[in-house]
Image: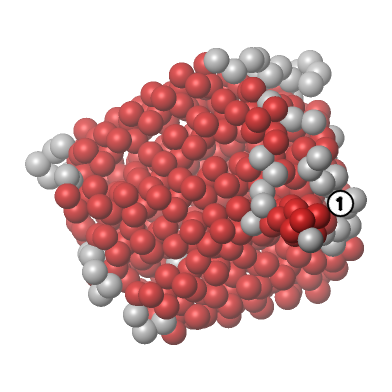
Amino acid sequence: MVLFARAALRLVVIDARPLLIYRDFRLLWTARLVTGIGSQITYVALWYQIYQITRSPLAVGLVGLVQVVPILLLALIGGSLADLLDRRRVVLFTEAALAAVSILLLANAGFAAPQVWILYVAAALGAGLETVQRPSLDALIPRLVDPADLVPAAAISSLQQTVGVVAAPALGGILIATVGLPVTYGVDVATFLISLGLIWFMRAVPAARVEAASLSHLTAGLRYALSRRDLLGTYLVDMAAMIFGMPEALFPALAVHLGGARSLGFLFSAPAAGALLAAGTSGWTRRVSRQGTAIAVAASVWGLAMVGLGFSPSLLPALACLALAGGADEISALFRSAVWNRTIPDDVRGRVAGVELISYASGPALGNLESGVVASLFSVRVSIISGGVLCVAGVAAVLAALPAILSIRLPTARPPE
């Protein structure tokens, strides 16, 4: 009976060994946890401030437009830098620049009449810097842990992200309502200082091999991704889910009828709460071998949950649907990470991470733009429901065009000892 209980526990409890074993992974994990909390607080504050000034869902949705441009322009460059330079150094410098963006938001919030254009500029700068930084972050983890520990390391990393996203938006809403926007932005600045200190103490992570910068080097990740139809399918499934089923731009408008700033924070937190539950009980995922099928199913569940959100009559059902969507997205992300990290060579991993970034960063940005436009033409409810339906249809279309995604099968990871 005891042996059976232990075996059952291993199926659901997250494998935390990578966090205990690998020093630099632990430093990076802690740094991302701290700065993630601050960034999510600012994320809510920026969108709230734009809606507070303009009272327009379309104005909030336009944040997606100003973000997607630097993402598309810089994703391949960020990936190339991750394979040419010390990845830790790239993360350190971009983290410092992101701190400067938060200081700009803090200064703007202190003006008697805060400027909307400054908010858009900050959103674009932040998206550009995160685009340059993210490939180095993604390519760091496979260099910090052994290959056998990549799946649990991905789960722990997702747990770190979702812990911040669960707590921070709700905290952001409370801070906005109680102490105001300047203090709220100031919290983000403080978290960046802590993160910079932790990353500073990490060891260098130089490029796997010395290469000269060139156009061919820059586009190698794109060529590799296009040669892998199964890999391309994972990108497009994720983009379909995010472009059609990402309603965050509508949250400020929803919150007006659901309790104001405090409810806004909970709307942003709910998907992360579902993701946290999924990540915290992800032990079973290491036994799944049909990762492609799991990615497609999870993306479809996301779309169906968005349909449920559109029909929700009050706050609690809305939060439940958002939590279900977040859990599905987390499962999809875990399997996508396993496919990417276990099948991509290290010397091209940074550049392929840049291609991945185009899918998982531009998708939400475009999705927020799409939801804002549809809401301005019809209504918030129509925008959410139609987006969820189109998400499911988009996933089906990708599977029809690229059935290779369903053939993705990786060996199951070894269970913890």
Q: In this view, does 312 lie above or below 334?
A: below
Nearer to us in this view, 384 or 164: 164
How many marks do you count on the picture?
A: 1
- Please report the residue visible at 78 percent of the width from the left and 70 percent of the height from the top: 399
Where the C terminus falls, by quadrant?
top right
> Does any portion of residue 308 appear in the rendered image?
yes
Left-right relation of 46 to 153:
left
Most distant residue in the left direction: 112
Relative image position of residue 158 (x, y in whole percent): 60, 47
- Please report the residue visible at 45 percent of the width from the left and 50 percent of the height from the top: 165
- Look at the image and name its color scheme: secondary structure
Q: Name the residue under label 1.
A: 412
Q: Which image quadrant is residue 50 in?
A: bottom left
Left-right relation of 297 to 166:
right
- Please report the residue visible at 76 percent of the width from the left and 65 percent of the height from the top: 294
Crowd band around label 1 with a 10 angstrom C-alpha radius: few (<14), some (14–19), many (20+): some
Q: Which image quadrant is residue 179 in?
A: top left
Nearer to us in this view, 226 or 288: 288
Relative image position of residue 176 (x, y in whole percent): 22, 50
Relative image position of residue 351 (x, y in whole percent): 72, 35
Where the N terminus falls, by quadrant?
bottom right
Mark 1 lies on a secondary structure that is: loop
Most distant residue in the front direction: 1
Q: Which amino acid does label 1 sit on?
A: Thr
> Does any portion of residue 244 appear in the rendered image?
no
